[in-house]
């Protein structure tokens, strides 16, 4: 294969170069220069991105009152769980109030129930104590009688 020689002028620097069998219109020196310039601009942009760090905002979560950092200015909640908790807060409040009322009723009912049981137990204890005390008195009398017989 023979290589043809076509000497043309570069469209950028106007210097002569061998085009050969290609359709190039720019010499290799200009191609390298363009590549170097592109690399320099890319590096400069990259350097700026490294220097400019993102802003962090400190926000307070309305659901759990914790302070968290975020890059987004309009973020309100620290987690997805807090979002759900905040949305269901009114129903949670109603449920908690109902639970408190229900537990208070159970406490009152248990107190009434156990008061009745305590009254019954006191009566039973009094009757048992009375019987045992009467038996003790009888046995003491027997003991005195037996000692006096000696």
Image: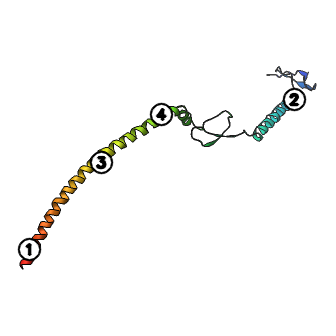
Disc 1, disc 3: CB below 8 Å?
Answer: no
Tag on residue 145?
1
Q: Is residue 133 left or right of residue 87?
A: left
Going by the picture, which residue comes out furthest to the bottom? 150
Disc nearest the viewer among 3 and 4: 3
| Residue in the picture at 22% in, 56% down | 125
Spot occupied by residue 81 in the image (x, y as percentages of width and height): 54, 36
* Real-space CA distance between mark 3 and mark 4, rounded to the nearest whole angstrom: 32 Å
Image height of 99 relative to 18, above or below: below
Q: CA distance from mark 1 to mark 3?
A: 44 Å
Residue position marked by numbered label 2 in the rendering: 30
Q: How many marks?
A: 4
**Which residue occupies the foreground of this view, 45 or 29?**
45
The image quarter containing residue 6 is top right
Q: Which label sits in the foreground, 1 or 3? A: 1
Label located before the other in sequence (3 or 4): 4
At mark 3, the secondary structure is helix
Mark 4: few/some/many CA within 10 Å (<14, 14-19, 20+): few
Q: Residue at x 83, y 19 (%)?
A: 23
Q: Nearer the viewer, mark 1 or mark 2?
A: 1
- Mark seen at residue 115: 3
Neighbourhood count class around disc 3 (C-alpha, 10 Å): few under 14, some 14–19, many 20 upward: few
Q: Nearer the viewer, residue 142 or 27?
A: 142
Image location of residue 97, percent across then percent down:
46, 37
Element under label 1? helix
In the figure, is residue 130 to the left or right of 18? left
Labels 2 and 4: the sequence-earlier one: 2
Q: Which mark is residue 94?
A: 4
Q: Earlier in the sequence, mark 4 or mark 1?
A: 4
């Amino acid at each position: 294969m023979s290589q043809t020689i076509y000497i043309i002028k570069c469209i950028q620097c106007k210097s002569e170069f061998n085009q050969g069998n290609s359709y190039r219109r720019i010499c290799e020196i200009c191609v390298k220069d363009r590549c170097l310039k592109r690399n320099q601009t890319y590096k400069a942009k990259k350097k700026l991105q490294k220097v400019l760090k993102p802003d962090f905002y400190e926000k307070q979560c309305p659901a759990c009152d914790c302070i968290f950092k975020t890059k987004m200015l309009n973020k309100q909640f620290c987690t997805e769980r807090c979002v759900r908790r905040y949305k269901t807060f009114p129903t949670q409040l109603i449920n908690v109030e109902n639970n408190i009322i229900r537990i208070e009723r159970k406490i009152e009912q248990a107190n009434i129930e156990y008061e009745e049981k305590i009254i019954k137990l006191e009566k039973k204890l009094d009757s048992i104590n009375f019987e045992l005390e009467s038996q003790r008195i009888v046995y003491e009398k027997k003991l005195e009688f037996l000692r006096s017989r000696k």
